[in-house]
Amino acid sequence: MLVSLQDMLQDAQKNNYAIASINTPNQILLRAVIAAAEDTNMPVTINHAQTEESVVPIEIAVPLMLDYAKKSKAAISVHVDHGFDFDHIMKAIRLGCTSIMYDCSRFPLEKNISEVKKFVEIAHPLGIGVEAELGAMPNNMPSEVHGQETSDLSDLTVYYTKPEEAERFCEETKCDVLTISFGTVHGMYASEPNLNIDLVREINALANGVSLGMHGGSGTPFDQIQSAITAGIKKINYFTAIDTAPAPYLAKTIAEAKNPVNFSLLANQAMEVIYNKTVEILNVFKNTGL
Ligand SMILES: [Zn+2]
């Protein structure tokens, strides 16, 4: 069923778990992720990322996502991930998205606040949830698909969200989720991640009821993910580990095949791997121990 991000967050706050936020740029991912949400009884936001417009345009992706969400017995929000410009996020509203990330983190604090505030004032009366970002998320993507340049990963503290800015941001914008930077990386980690859980706790105490978001979940040790949830993270973007999971299995199938391989067989195999990986991560996000 289609559920608002706000209702999902309320339940996640009450029961101390995190909502998974997963990009579904094709029907294989979409079916696998929704089946995993149903079988684990966990809410999920399925995402269309603006950076994936070249993979699938929003006009094609969102109607399909909405159809699957409405027919599912799991709680699903159809979400825009990293919406960078106003025209795009307004188009997403018209297409029926139930929650939207308006990412103005590249701007100075004042402009980030004023842009997000302006959008919240449009979105909230329509029942649409708003996620924003403060601080910077470094990128280390496994491919060029996402169109994000690789960042300098030598010192992740330079990207951290500042608690006093987060306090002001939450108070003034009244967004529903504030994604913060505390040691995670979009894509792959260059070395063993070491998240700053104290920073999450500190910002959570200042967030005025706004839920905190974490991006770059892939590759983070499960115990650190659960510590971050307990400290205040209630929405986690998790994609690279899911999207790269099928490749080794498909490579093996192709290498061992005696005859030409049907794409539809590979697609089904990929769907099964993605389903298993998603079930695994959704069980971690329940935050009931490992
Ligand atoms: Zn992100």
Image (cartoon, grey):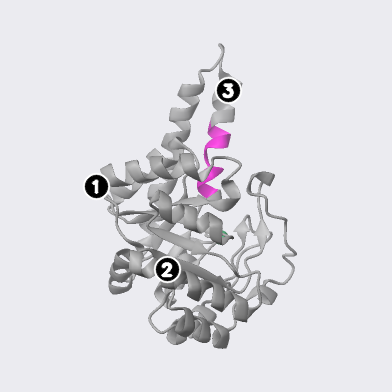
Question: Which marked residue is nearer to the observer: mark 1 or mark 2?
Answer: 2
Residue under label 3: 254
Question: Is ligand 1 less than 8 Å from the beta carbon at label 3?
Answer: no
Q: Earlier in the sequence, mark 1 or mark 2?
A: 1
- Residue that extends furthest to the top in the rendered view of this protein: 259
Above or below, 257 relative to 230: above
**Badge 3 element:** helix
Residue neighbourhood size for the residue with mark 2, other residues' Cα within 10 Å, grouped as few (<14), some (14–19), many (≥20):
few
Residues at marks 1 and 3, CA–CA distance in whole angstroms: 35 Å
Whether residue 245 appears in magenta in the rendering, the answer is yes
Above or below, 196 relative to 31: below
Question: Which marked residue is nearer to the observer: mark 2 or mark 3?
Answer: 2
Image marks 2 and 3: residues in contact by CB distance under 8 Å:
no
Magenta range is 241-249
Whether residue 57 appears in magenta in the rendering, the answer is no
Residues at marks 1 and 2, CA–CA distance in whole angstroms: 29 Å
Residue under label 2: 122
Residue under label 1: 73
Residue neighbourhood size for the residue with mark 1, other residues' Cα within 10 Å, grouped as few (<14), some (14–19), many (≥20):
some
Determine if residue 99 is in view.
yes
- At x 44% / y 74%, what residue is drawn? 175
